[in-house]
Image (cartoon, grey):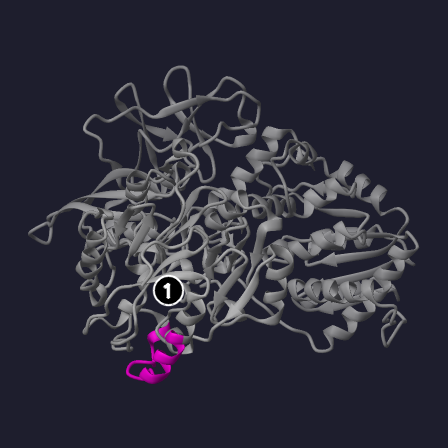
Amino acid sequence: MVLDPSPLMRNILVCPPDHYGIEYVINPWMEGNVHRSSEPLARRQWHEFTRCLSSHATLQTVAPQPGWPDMVFTANAGLVLEKQCVLSRFFHPERRGEEPLFREWFAARGYNIHELPPDLPFEGAGDALWDPTRSVLWAAYGMRTELESHPHLADALRVEVLSLRLVDPRFYHLDTCFCPLKNGALLYYPPAFDSASRRLIEDRVPAAQRIVVQEPDAVQFACNAVDLGSRLILSRASEELQTRLREQANVETIQSPLDEFLKAGGGAKCLTLRLDDPPPSDRNRAGSTVELRELQMRGHLLDSGLLDRAIETAIAGGGSFRIIDFALGRQRQSASSTTIQISAPGHESLEAITAQLLVLGATLASPIEDDAHLAAVTQDGVAPEDFYVTTIYPTDVRVHAQWQPVNGQRMDGVIVLSSEGAAHCKLIRDLRRGEQIVVGAVGLRTRRLAEARDRGSLPAEEFSFMGAGVSSERRVELVVEQIAWELHRLRARGARTVVVPGPVTIHTGAGEHLAWLIRHGYVQALLSGNAVAVHDIEQALFGTSLGVDLQRGVPVHGGHRHHLRAINTIRRAGGIAAAVTAGALTRGVFYECVRHHVQFSLAGSIRDDGPLPDTQMDLIQAQADYARLLQGAEMILMLSSMLHSIGVGNMTPAGVRLVCVDINPAVVTKLADRGSLESVGVVTDVGLFLSLLVQRLEKLSTTAAEPSIASFPK
């Protein structure tokens, strides 16, 4: 064995599969595969893989030991940077016996070994990947590794740690869905991460360097690859992905099938541990954004389910928890008490989790209670950053060491403190310069009725505003083909098309398709209400619409605040166009409108939060504005917006083609009843419609072929 590898060679630790097998289930891949692996085939695949690897790297070997079948996955032995080694603390007891074996191996070779506190799971280079281009350590949590380990990694290795939360159990380690390449490119599967982590990745890695893996490749562990610079060794990859790697990252792929190891949830990267990652280029940036806070709870915590709910709230909010102490009530009427340490990947998420725990009756565990933190309003109708969003529950605020109730309690307001020290709720739009409002979660407590606390009756979907329904209409593809052809012809001769979208357009995730239509010149005006713009901007800023993660289709805890924060961001900038110019809004439907000079009009209503500065609250003026933008229109796309579609239909002259898309047949019928022969009703889901429409238009842009039916449907 070569002990002094060439500088051009990688130095990698492997472990022969002498005792490999699937003897238990600790991840979804193992289910149904216990005792079903082929030992001879696993040996052949491992030897072929390491033979291929040895052509590009120097391999070191740790001796396998009986009783530890997963020891072959050396990526989980620890994390090595220079001669520093942070040993793993395995989450599952089935692997904890590997820890002393790997400790002995590293100690015998002179590594400086760092060990995390007991019971703090961290699974090595499976959950922590060094990015030499950016000189950062990407570290995962949520499945096997705890978030609290990340500050320890930053301190031990003196590196900057970026925390990513895994949410798909199939991708239980970071290296199963994320692979930073030496040339700066990133191979990853976005749905494996929560929305905050996806935004962090997008902020740190330019779009041109992000190579998104689709699910068919992701489940073959295409991201679980060994990076050798100009070559990438993996188990399997589609031709399409190989082409993108070659063209976008100048990387050639080497496929070495490892199907027997995939049965246990492992691939090429899992079978290796890099021993010679370069040192950080900037030690001054060392650290982690993880923040901790202690809270106390008292009451019937177990039989009411409040403690479970508090833990679920912390986890669902992207954080983690540790029970510091717990005193159990000894009798039925006795109260229990606990102190919980909450950790979160950043200050913003910690404040959001804390605010939700305050609703459950938690209080900050501080030896000396602090007064509420205040910030002054510097612009009418705009709240300072980190403003506290009120709920329906009675709230107390601590002022001058005294607790006092907040008057006018309501949901989705802010707490304003008068010069006399009185507290009351106020809407963001009513704020005036100089007023003092409560920010953060310090000095606040929520009063809940005792009987409600005893039942633990906070509804599971308390702030979930929308449900989901998908329907498909027969022959919808044919109708879409005809509409696409008409749009293609209208754009070719410079005709005017107006779109009237409803909020469902954003809720269904179809905003990206509408943005595509605007970006490619198929839309000349957009007519809608305040809600569409707010939801689109919320999605652009936070990845949610009304607090629902559009990637995963589930409510985000604390997401009910996002629409208010989106409104606040635009109000601070002075409007949508100003937000785009200032760089505060960088994507979405209305971003494309501004960038491509597509005029829009937002008609307000009594339901609107905010509203946005662009929203016209004078309905007479809004009608006139609608009529102005409709002049000269030859086609109007009405997308799941009954109120605005009917309003637009009533002011549109005959001869204008109307396309009404709605999952509710009554809306389509009402528009068709106006008697226009140019009206087309499509009873289907707007998300499906726009997706098919964009697909068809993309094909029309690259071919001269005409559709089978060129005439517009009657």
Q: Is residue 574 magenta?
A: no
Say which residue appears at 52% left-offset and 68% top-offset. Answer: 254
- Could you tell me residue 226's position as x and y percent? 45, 61
Q: Looking at this rendering, what residue extends furthest in the left direction?
A: 330
Say left or right for 295 vs 259.
Answer: left
- Could you tell me residue 571's position as x and y percent? 60, 31
Above or below 236: residue 323:
above
Mark 1 surroundings: few (<14), some (14-19) or many (≥20) residues within 10 A: many
Above or below 400: residue 184:
below
Classify the position of the C terminus by image quarter. bottom right
- Could you tell me residue 15's position as x and y percent? 30, 67
- Count of numbered circles in the view: 1
Say left or right for 629 vs 609.
Answer: right
Of residue 468 and residue 190, the one placed in the foreground of this image is 190
Q: Is residue 32 magenta?
A: yes
Say left or right for 579 vs 340.
Answer: right
Q: In this orientation, does residue 222 appear? A: no
SS of the residue at dot 1? helix
- Could you tell me residue 122's position as x and y percent? 28, 53
Residue with the mark numbered 1: 270
Q: In this orientation, does residue 417 appear? A: yes
Say left or right for 517 vs 651.
Answer: left
Above or below 566: residue 400:
above
Q: Looking at this rendering, what residue extends furthest in the top direction?
A: 419
Of residue 292 and residue 410, the one placed in the foreground of this image is 292
Classify the position of the N terminus by image quarter. bottom left
Say which residue appears at 88% left-offset and 66% top-offset. Answer: 677
Give amino acid for label 1: Cys
Of residue 330 and residue 585, the one placed in the foreground of this image is 585
Say which residue appears at 83% left-offset and 44% top-offset. Answer: 629
Query: Which segment did they paint magenta?
Result: 29-47
